[in-house]
C-alpha cells in the first residue's frame, strides 16, 4: 500500500489542533488498563487463477498464467497497539458502518476485555463514528461500548499520523502481495502473519513529536498577534 503524506498548503488551525492531539496521545506512557490502539482499514481485490500454477522444482521457479479472474473484494480492519507490539486484523466482506461497529465491539470485548478504556486513534472515514454503534446495536449496548472508548481523530489530510496505516503497509508487502482467491484464504494467511509478528513483538518507533511539528510544520500554524490590553495605565 503506497500512500504519501498529504499536508495542507496553508495555515490550518483545525489540522494542527487534531495533529497535536494525536501526537500528545502517542507521548503517553504504556498503560495496560488504557491501551492505545490505532485503527485503519483497507480493501483487497480477490484474484482467482484460471489455470493451475506450476510449482517450484529444482532448477525451475514457480510459474503462473498471466490470465486471472477477479473474485470480488474483502475488507481488512487493522487494530494495532504500538506500545505493546500487538496487532489484530479482522477480515470482513464489507466496510459499512455496521461492519465498523462490530469491529469495535470485537476490539473491546474480545481483544481488550479487561481494559478500563481503549484509547482509539483513527482517521475521519465517514463510517468511523460512534454513531455507527447506534446503527448496529440497541442503544444500551451502543452506550456501553461508547463508555469504554476514548477516541482521537487524525486530521483531514493527516492519515499518516495513524500508525495502523504503517502496519497495513507492512501487511501488504509481507503477506498480501500475491494472488489470493477468496476471503477464507486471506483470513488464513493474515492470521499466520499476525501470529508471527505478534510473537516477535514488532513495534513502531514513533519519534515525531509536538515540538518537532511546531518546527518542521510551522507553516501550518496560524500567525497570532499579542493580545492588546484595553486597560489604560495611569
Image (cartoon, helix red, strand yellow):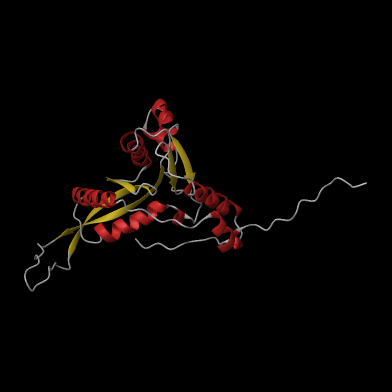
Q: Residue furthest bottom?
A: 59
Residue 65: quarter of image: bottom left
Residue 9 can be seen, yes or no: no
In the rendered image, the vertical position of residue 24 relative to residue 59, given as above or below = above
| Residue appearing at x 57%, y 56% in the figure | 211
| Drawn side of residue 183 relative to residue 116, left or right | left
**In terms of depth relative to the viewer, which is nearer, 192 or 180?**
192
Residue 170 in the image, given as x and y percentages of width and height: 32, 58
Residue 164 in the image, given as x and y percentages of width and height: 38, 51
Residue 199 in the image, given as x and y percentages of width and height: 26, 49
Residue 133: quarter of image: top left
**In terms of depth relative to the viewer, which is nearer, 63 or 165?**
165
| Residue appearing at x 6%, y 68% in the figure | 57
**In terms of depth relative to the viewer, which is nearer, 147 or 202?**
202
| Drawn side of residue 24 relative to residue 194, left or right | right
Residue 108: quarter of image: top left
**In terms of depth relative to the viewer, which is nearer, 179 or 217?**
217
In the rendered image, the vertical position of residue 153 relative to residue 170, given as above or below = above
Residue 135 in the image, given as x and y percentages of width and height: 40, 34
Q: Residue furthest left?
A: 58
Q: Quadrant of the N terminus?
A: bottom left
Q: Residue furthest right?
A: 234
In the rendered image, the vertical position of residue 207 relative to residue 103, given as above or below = below
Residue 141 can be seen, yes or no: yes
Amino acid at each position: 500500500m503506497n500512500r504519501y503524506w498529504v499536508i495542507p498548503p496553508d495555515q490550518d488551525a483545525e489540522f494542527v489542533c487534531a495533529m497535536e492531539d494525536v501526537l500528545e496521545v502517542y507521548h503517553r506512557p504504556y498503560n495496560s488498563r488504557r491501551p492505545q490502539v490505532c485503527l485503519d482499514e483497507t480493501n483487497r481485490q480477490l484474484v482467482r487463477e484460471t489455470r493451475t500454477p506450476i510449482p517450484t522444482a529444482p532448477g525451475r521457479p514457480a510459474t503462473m498464467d498471466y490470465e486471472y479472474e477477479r473474485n470480488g473484494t474483502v475488507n481488512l480492519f487493522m487494530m494495532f497497539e504500538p506500545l505493546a507490539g500487538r496487532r489484530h486484523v479482522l477480515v470482513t466482506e464489507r466496510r459499512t458502518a455496521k461492519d465498523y461497529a462490530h469491529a469495535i465491539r470485537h476490539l473491546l470485548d474480545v481483544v481488550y476485555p479487561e481494559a478500563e478504556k481503549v484509547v482509539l486513534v483513527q482517521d475521519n472515514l465517514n463510517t468511523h463514528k460512534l454513531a455507527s454503534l447506534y446503527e448496529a446495536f440497541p442503544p444500551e449496548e451502543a452506550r456501553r461500548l461508547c463508555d469504554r472508548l476514548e477516541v482521537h481523530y487524525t486530521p483531514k489530510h493527516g492519515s499518516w499520523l495513524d500508525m495502523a496505516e504503517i502496519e497495513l503497509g507492512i501487511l501488504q508487502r509481507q503477506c498480501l502481495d500475491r494472488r489470493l482467491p477468496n476471503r477464507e484464504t486471506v483470513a488464513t494467511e493474515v492470521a499466520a502473519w499476525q501470529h508471527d509478528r505478534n510473537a516477535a513483538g514488532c513495534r513502531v518507533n514513533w519519534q515525531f513529536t509536538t515540538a518537532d511539528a511546531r518546527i518542521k510544520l510551522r507553516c501550518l500554524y496560524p500567525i497570532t498577534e499579542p493580545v492588546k490590553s484595553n486597560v489604560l495605565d495611569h
